[in-house]
Image (cartoon, coloured by chain):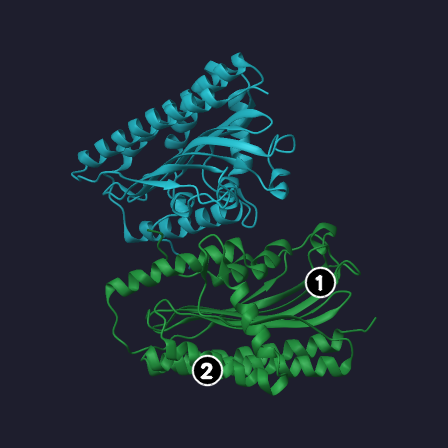
Chain colours: A cyan, B green
Amino acid sequence: MTDWTSHTARARNWFETLRDNICAEFEAIEAEAGSNARFDYIEWDRDTDDASDGGGGVRGAMKGKVFEKVGVNVSTVSGAFSPEFAKTIHGADEDPTFTATGISLVAHMANPHVPAVHMNTRFLTTGKAWFGGGADLNPPLPYEEDTQAFHAAFRATCSKHNPTYYDRFSKWADEYFFIPHRNVARGVGGIFYDHLECDDEDAWDRNFAFTQDVGSTFLDIFPKLVRKRMHMPFSEAEKTQQREWRGRYVEFNLVYDRGTLFGLKTGGNIDAILMSLPPDVTWS
Amino acid sequence: MTDWTSHTARARNWFETLRDNICAEFEAIEAEAGSNARFDYIEWDRDTDDASDGGGGVRGAMKGKVFEKVGVNVSTVSGAFSPEFAKTIHGADEDPTFTATGISLVAHMANPHVPAVHMNTRFLTTGKAWFGGGADLNPPLPYEEDTQAFHAAFRATCSKHNPTYYDRFSKWADEYFFIPHRNVARGVGGIFYDHLECDDEDAWDRNFAFTQDVGSTFLDIFPKLVRKRMHMPFSEAEKTQQREWRGRYVEFNLVYDRGTLFGLKTGGNIDAILMSLPPDVTWS
C-alpha cells in the first residue's frame, strides 16, 4: 500500500493556505462594509478513547456585518473506523484505518439578498485514497444571474480538467443537496464530487490540482456575488423569509448530510461539525 | 389474529377528546394573559402511492402570547411498511401491515422561565398490538421545584397502575431524551414507555387506562407550571439562552427522534411531523 503521509501533508497545507486566503478576503469585505469583524480561531483535538486515534483541527468563526455567521474549519484526523461504520465508507472494508484532511466552509449572510454558501474539499485515505468536495449556493432569495455566474465559474474550472466533470458533478450536486421529505432542492446547486481515486502519483497530481482549482474558483466567484448584493436594502418580510429558508438548511444538514454524520460518528468536534447551522432560524 | 379495529377507534376517540381538553385549557391560559389566540386546525391526508395505504390526521396549531408556538397532532394511519423499514418496527417482521393512532404535542413557550414540553401517546398494531407514549419537560431555565412537581405527578400516576412503572419509565425517558453528540440530556426528563403489549382484552384495558391517565396527568400538571411562571419578567439574555437551548432540541428531533423518523418514512404530513420544531432558534 502506498504511504500517503506526505500527500496528506501537502493537501493539508493547501487547505490551510486556502483558508487563510478566504478569511482574509471575507475580512476585507467586512472592512468595506465599515465593520472591523475578524475571524477567531479555536484549535480542537479529536475526542477519542483510543490513543492510536488522533488529529484535530482549527475552527475559524466570524460574526460580522455582512457575514452574519461564517465558519471555516480545517481538520486533519486519523484513526480506525468501527467495523459497522467501516462498511459505509469507500475502501474501509479493505482497511478500517483512515486519514482525512479537509476544509469545510459555511457562510450565512446578514442580508437575505446575499446567498448563503457551502464549500468543502477533502483528501481521504483508507484502503483507497481519494479527493472529494464541492460547493453549492444557497440563496434565500435567488437571483438567476447569480446562479448562472456561480455555475459558469465552476463549469469553466471543471472544463479545464475533464470535459465530463461539470455535467457529472453539477448533477451530483442536484441529487445530493436535495431534501426528500420536502421534495425540494436545498439551494440552486453547484458541484459535488467524491471518490476521485488516486491510484498512482499522476492521478494524485491531477486530482489535487482539480481540488485546488475548486477552492480557488470559490474564492474568486463568491466574494463577487457578496459585493454585488451586500448593500441591497431588504424588508423585515425578506428577513423572515430568510429565517424560514434556513430551517430547510438545518433539516438537510441534520437529517441527510454525510459530512455531518461522518463528524458525529468519528468523534469530531461538535462545534466544528455543527458550525454549519445558521444563526437565527424560524420554523413557522 | 385479533381484529384491533374497534380498539383503534376507541383509542383514537380518546386521543381526540384529550386534544380537545388540552386545547381548551391552553386557550384559557391565553385568555388569562389577555390574548384571544385560538388553535387553528388543519386536516391532512397521508401522502402515499399505494391505494391500500391511508389515513391522515388533524394538526392543531396556536401562536399566542404565552404559547409562542404549540402544535397538537392527532393522526390515525394504516398501511404496510417497506420490507427494510419493517425490520426496525416491533412485530412488523411477522406482519408488515400496521395501524397507528396517536396524539403528539409540543409546546414552545414565549417566556424562557416557562418550560417547553412534549407529550405523545399512541396505540400501534402490527403482528403485535401495543401502547407507547410519554411526556418530558424541557425548561430552557430549569427550576428544581418544577422538575420535582412534573415527576411527582407522573410518579403518582404510574404507581396507581404498576409499582415498577415510574422507575422503569423515568429511566427510559432519561435514556431516550439524550443527545449523544453533546453528551447532555434534552431536558429534565419525565416518562417514556413503549411496547406495552396487548396480548388479550384485559391487557388492552389496563394499558389503555394507563395511557389515558398519562394524558390526563399531563393536562393536570403542565398548565400549573405554565401559570406559575408565565408572568415572570425575563431579560434579553434569558431569551437568547432559550433560543440557543432550542437548537439542542432541534438537533435531538432531527438526528435521533424515532417519532420523526417514523413520520418521514411512512409518508406522514411534513408540517405535522416537524411541528415540533421551535420558532426562533439560534446556533451561535
The percent coordinates of residue A180 (x first, y second) are 57, 46
Q: Is residue B130 above or below residue A105?
A: below
The amino acid at mark 2 is Ile
Element type at mark 1 = loop
Comparing B62 with B281, the one in front is B281
Q: Is residue B110 above or below residue A81?
A: below
Comparing B152 with B87, the one in front is B152
Horizontally, residue A189 falls left or right of residue B78, namely left
Q: Residues within 10 Å of mark 1 (few under 14, many from 20)?
A: some
- Which residue lies most toward the front here? A51
Counting residues from the N terminus, which is met first, the one under dot 1 or under dot 2?
1
Q: What residue would you read off at disc 2?
A: B221
Instruction: Determine the residue positioned at 35% across, 28% down.
Output: A16
Identify the image quadrant of residue B235. bottom left
Q: Residue B166, labelled with which disc?
A: none
> Is any part of residue B222 visible from this angle?
no
Q: Are marks 1 and 2 in contact (CB under 8 Å)?
A: no
The percent coordinates of residue A12 (x first, y second) are 40, 26
Element type at mark 2 = helix
- Which residue lies most toward the top here? A202
* Label 2: chain letter: B
- Which residue lies most toward the left here? A34
* Label 1: chain letter: B
Q: What residue would you read off at disc 1?
A: B90
Q: Is residue A210 above or below residue A32?
A: above
Identify the image quadrant of residue A98. top right
- Which residue lies most toward the bottom here? B160
The percent coordinates of residue A230 (x first, y second) are 26, 38
The percent coordinates of residue A252 (x first, y second) are 49, 46
The amino acid at mark 1 is His
